[in-house]
Image (cartoon, rainbow, N blue to C red):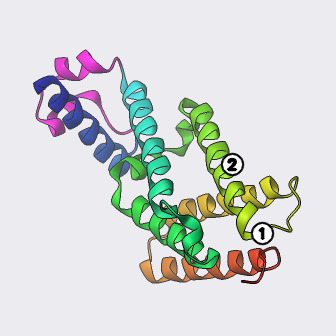
Amino acid sequence: MRSQRRLEAIVTAAAESFAQFGVGDTTMEGIAARAGTSIGSVYQFFPNKRAVFREIAQRCMLESRRGYAILVGPDPLAQPWDTTLRRVIDGFRGLHQGSVLMQAVWRNLELYGEYAEADQALMRELIAATAGLLQFWAPRLPDDRRPVVATMLVNTVATLMLVLVREQDDTRGDALVAETKRMLEGYLAGYVAAP
């Protein structure tokens, strides 16, 4: 139990440092100091900063997976498609703003190779789930087009998150979110059956 608490403190301290300073400007000693533990404890769990970063990236992807499931909800067809779309976009924005794990990963995109395979698997999952929703929302959309449209949706929202990480002005961020919603709603309207 104590060991697990120490591990969590180390991961949190590393994520905060990676988000604030970047992986390159963070030291293992700095992580230990921020976690309130010894450098030996950090090395007990992780051989180097990249190993810590990989753990953070894995946890970030788990947060994304869980976030998608929560935001879509247990019965996504109970709400109109555009309500679900807006909820997912707003929810991911909130998740990215509130998660130090996500901030750490987005701040250090130069290390994408460390988690690329897992990230691509997650994206395939999200695209498949979105394509499943399109089967109901857009029943006239041909089966071979559904994954293409789902890919556009998922990647557009992911790109918005990247843009928001770089955007320092919240008012401008709000405008970018609103414009993305407008763009995707217009894009989907051509495919979605009228209620």
The amino acid type found where label 1 is placed reads Ala
Label 1 CA crowd tier, 10 Å (few <14, some 14–19, many 20+): many
Image quadrant for the N terminus? top left
The overriding secondary structure of the stretch rendered in magenta is: helix
* Image location (x, y in percent) of residue 125: 63, 44
The residues colored magenta run 24-47
* Image location (x, y in percent) of residue 156: 67, 63
* Image location (x, y in percent) of residue 137: 71, 69
Nearest to viewer (mark 2 / mark 1): 1
Label 2 CA crowd tier, 10 Å (few <14, some 14–19, many 20+): some
* Image location (x, y in percent) of residue 78: 55, 72
Which of 45 and 4 lies nearest the eye of the viewer?
Answer: 4
Query: Where 113 falls versus 144 (above or below)?
Result: above
Residue positioned 12% across, 29% down in the render: 37
Residue beneath label 1, please? 138
Query: Which of the 4 image quarters holds residue 186?
Result: bottom right
Q: How far apart are the two marked residues, 2 and 1, measured between alpha carbons?
A: 15 Å
Q: Secondary structure at mark 2?
A: helix
Residue 107 appears in the picture as rendered: no
Residue positioned 27% across, 20% down in the render: 45
Residue beneath label 2, please? 128
Q: Is residue 37 magenta?
A: yes
Residue positioned 54% across, 30% down in the render: 114
